[in-house]
Image (cartoon, rainbow, N blue to C red):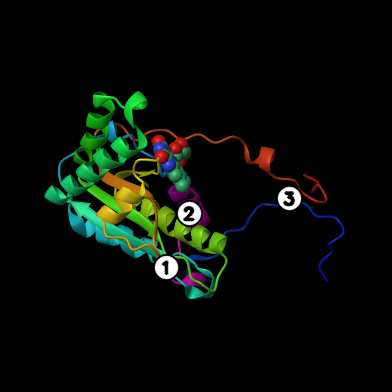
Amino acid sequence: MTDLSNPTRGSATPAPRSAHGSAPTPDEVLASLSARRSFKLKDLDPRPIDLALVDRMLEAANWAPSHGKTEPWRFVVFTGEERERLSRAFGEAYRALNPEGSFAEAGLDAQRAKPRLAPVWIALGVEPSPTRPEWEELIAFGCAVHNAQLMACALGLGSKWTSGAVVTHPIVRRAIGFSDAIQLRGFLYVGRPAVAWPAGERRPIEEKVRWVPTPTP
Ligand SMILES: Cc1cc2nc3c(=O)[nH]c(=O)nc-3n(C[C@H](O)[C@H](O)[C@H](O)COP(=O)(O)O)c2cc1C
């Protein structure tokens, strides 16, 4: 019988690859997770990308877990000239958020210019199930967006989830054709990196974990 009275931290033995067919190794999983980066818009190449790559991102998104298999993620992909629709909507939302005092022509121009700086803009929507807690649906949706970003990284694409007041404004939601039942939680913009892949950083996990009892080394 296993002795549970004295937990120790041993060496983690990786599961054999064959245990899950094509499952990645633990090292591959960690490498994939830690390499994913958010790219500033100015660090992307605005030229078009192969949309088959976006299909792969969406396929990855669709593998997210959801309680009760509600699959609440909804996406609208904007490319080419249709990004002008976003440009106009961002401008209108900026005007609505900045009446008089805080309005600046430069701010308006910056919002309108954003969609032209990345070749693909994916609107991120969540349609919560009426029978499930909203927080569960939001988390499932967040997992889907993360999956899409992990695939973008694997494909060598830069992306970022952008979620400010302008891009999530109801004016934008209506412009992209989301019904009232769908919450617009921002956009994932995607493009080829125009800079070296950025380095990531995190505060140590030890700051965020408590073990009970503390394992002996
Ligand atoms: C739900 C969510 C919303 C985000 N919204 C924004 C945003 O509006 N603007 C922004 O610059 N970054 C945004 N980010 C990206 C974070 O800034 C980024 O993930 C963080 O700096 C860590 O960097 P990394 O993604 O490269 O690891 C968002 C990330 C998440 C998960």
Q: Residue furthest front?
A: 100
Residue 25 inside the magenta-drawn segment: yes
Q: Amino acid at mark 2?
A: Val
Q: Which residue is mark 3?
A: 9
CB-based contact (under 8 Å), mark 1 and mark 3: no
Residue under the image location 29 percent in, 60 percent down: 56
User: Taken as a whole, is the magenta stretch helix, strand or loop?
Assistant: helix
**Mark carried by residue 212:** none
Counting from the top left corner in percent of width and height, residue 110 is at 25, 30
Magenta highlight range:
19-33
Q: Secondary structure at mark 3?
A: loop
**Relative height, residue 70 to residue 208 (above, below):** below
Query: For the residue carrying disc 2, how many other residues have a C-alpha within 10 Å: few (<14), some (14-19), or many (20+)?
Result: few
Q: Amino acid at mark 1?
A: Ser
The quarter of the rendering in which ligand 1 is drawn is: top left
Camera-nearest label, 2 or 1: 2
Counting from the top left corner in percent of width and height, residue 89 is at 25, 45
Camera-nearest label, 2 or 3: 2
Counting from the top left corner in percent of width and height, residue 119 is at 20, 45
Placement of the N terminus among the 4 image quadrants: bottom right
Q: Which residue is mark 2?
A: 29
**Relative height, residue 207 to residue 8 (above, below):** above
CB-based contact (under 8 Å), mark 2 and mark 1: no
Instruction: Measure how far apart labels 2 and 3 are at the Cα level.
Output: 21 Å
Q: Which residue is mark 1?
A: 22
